[in-house]
C-alpha cells in the first residue's frame, strides 16, 4: 500500500499544510480541495529546480491573507488538504503514472484536485485520471510554450510534449499566451481541429477577443497553469522564461472567466523554479493557488459558510 493510500485511509493530512491551516480546515475528511505536491523536474531542459516548486509554494503560503478582496469571501473555509509530496522517480512516464494514481485517489474522495509542480510533464498524469473519470475533457493550457513536440531529448513524456500527449488522449485543447514554438508546432496548430491557440501577441492586441477562444472549451475543463505564461517581470522564477507574457490581472481574468462559465474539474500550477533569496515569485505562485481555490469555491464548490458578500446572501 502506498503512503498516500495509507494516509487517505487513516484520514491524515501531514504538515506542512497549505497556509498553515489548522486541522479543522486542512484534515482530509473535512477538506473539499486537495493539493497534490509533485516535486519533480526530471525533464527540465534549461533551468532545473522545479522540484523545489511545491515546497516553495507551501512555505510561502502562511504569508497569505486568507480573505479574498475580489470575492469578498474566505476561500479556505471549504477546507484545503495537502497531501505529502509524491516520491519522485527518474523516468517521466513512471512519474505521470504516480500523478495519475494520486489524482484518482483525490477524485474517488470527491475532492477538487490541484496539482503543484514540478515541471510541466506531470500534467499528463492528472489529465489521464480526469479523463478516466469524466471521459474526454477540454484542457485550458496557459503557457508561453506550445509543448506540442512528438518527443524531446529522447522522451515522449518531456515537458515539451505535454500538449501533444493531451491531444492523443482525445481531449480538446485551448492554449493561451503562447509565444515560443517550432514551425512544425505552428503547422499542427493550423491543422488540428481539436486545438485552438491564442498567441501572446494576439492576446496583447485584443484581450477581449482572446477570451472569446474559451468558447472552444466543451464539457468538463481541466486548467493547466504553466507559470511562464506570466511575464518574467511578474514571474521570473520559471524553468524556461519568455518575454512578453501576461500580467497578473490578465491571468486572473482568464481564470475567473473559465470558472464562471465551465465546470472545472481540476487544475495544476507548474514550473515554479525558485530563485534563491527571492521570495516574490514563490508568494505569487501561492497566491495564484489560493485564487484558484477561491474561484472554485465561489463559482463551483460549496460557497464558504461565512461569505461576507451581503448582497449575494440577501438575494
Ligand atoms: Mn511553458
Image (cartoon, rainbow, N blue to C red):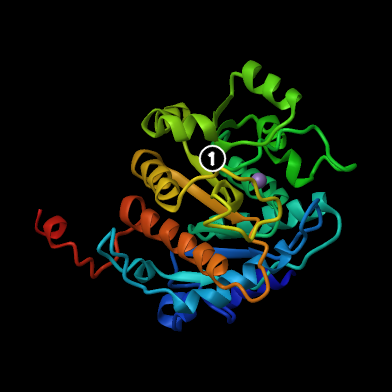
Crowd class of label 1 (few under 14; some 14 to 19; many from 20; radius 10 Å) = few
Q: Which of 23 and 257 is in front in this view?
A: 257
* Horizontal side, residue 142 vs residue 73: left or right: right
Residue at left offset 74%, top offset 64%: 49
Percent of width and height locating residue 274: 66, 67
Q: Residue furthest top?
A: 191
Percent of width and height locating residue 13: 56, 77
Q: Which of 313 and 285 is in front in this view?
A: 285
* Horizontal side, residue 47 vs residue 257: left or right: right
Give the residue pinned by disc 1: 134
SS of the residue under disc 1:
helix
Q: Which of 44 and 172 is in front in this view?
A: 44
Residue at left offset 39%, top offset 39%: 262
* Horizontal side, residue 290 vs residue 74: left or right: right
Residue 27 in view (yes/no)? no
- On screen, 268 above or below 192? below
Residue 54 in view (yes/no)? yes
Residue at left offset 66%, top offset 39%: 145
Percent of width and height locating residue 4: 67, 69
Q: Which residue lies furthest to the left in this view?
A: 314
Percent of width and height locating residue 241: 66, 50
Q: Quadrant of residue 191?
A: top right
- On screen, 183 above or below 141? above
Residue at left offset 82%, top offset 40%: 156
- On screen, 192 above or below 243? above
Amino acid at each position: 500500500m502506498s503512503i498516500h493510500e495509507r494516509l487517505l485511509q487513516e484520514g491524515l493530512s501531514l504538515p506542512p499544510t497549505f497556509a498553515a491551516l489548522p486541522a479543522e480546515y486542512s484534515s482530509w475528511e473535512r477538506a473539499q480541495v486537495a493539493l497534490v505536491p509533485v516535486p519533480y523536474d526530471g525533464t527540465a531542459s534549461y533551468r532545473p529546480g522545479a522540484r523545489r516548486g511545491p515546497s516553495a509554494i507551501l512555505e510561502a503560503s502562511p504569508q497569505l491573507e486568507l480573505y479574498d478582496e475580489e470575492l469578498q469571501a474566505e476561500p479556505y473555509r471549504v477546507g484545503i488538504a495537502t497531501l505529502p509530496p509524491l516520491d519522485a522517480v527518474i523516468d517521466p512516464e513512471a512519474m505521470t503514472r504516480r500523478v495519475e494514481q494520486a489524482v484518482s485517489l483525490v477524485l474517488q474522495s470527491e475532492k477538487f484536485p490541484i496539482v503543484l509542480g514540478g515541471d510541466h510533464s506531470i500534467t499528463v498524469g492528472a489529465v489521464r485520471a480526469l479523463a478516466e473519470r469524466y471521459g474526454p475533457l477540454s484542457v485550458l493550457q496557459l503557457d508561453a510554450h506550445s509543448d506540442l513536440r512528438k518527443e524531446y531529448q529522447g522522451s515522449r513524456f518531456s515537458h515539451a510534449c505535454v500538449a501533444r500527449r493531451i491531444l492523443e488522449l482525445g481531449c480538446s485543447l485551448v492554449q493561451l499566451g503562447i509565444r515560443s514554438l517550432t514551425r512544425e508546432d505552428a503547422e499542427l496548430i493550423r491543422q488540428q481541429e481539436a486545438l485552438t491557440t491564442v498567441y501572446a501577441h494576439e492576446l496583447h492586441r485584443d484581450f477581449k477577443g482572446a477570451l472569446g477562444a474559451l468558447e472552444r472549451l466543451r464539457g468538463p475543463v481541466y486548467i493547466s497553469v504553466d507559470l511562464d505564461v506570466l511575464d518574467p517581470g511578474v514571474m521570473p522564477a520559471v524553468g524556461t522564461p519568455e518575454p512578453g507574457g501576461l500580467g497578473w490581472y490578465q491571468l486572473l481574468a482568464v481564470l475567473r472567466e473559465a470558472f464562471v462559465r465551465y465546470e472545472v474539474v481540476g487544475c495544476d500550477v507548474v514550473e515554479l523554479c525558485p530563485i534563491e533569496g527571492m521570495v516574490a515569485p514563490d508568494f505569487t505562485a501561492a497566491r495564484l493557488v489560493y485564487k484558484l481555490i477561491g474561484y472554485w469555491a465561489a463559482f463551483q464548490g460549496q460557497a464558504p459558510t461565512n461569505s461576507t458578500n451581503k448582497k449575494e446572501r440577501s438575494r
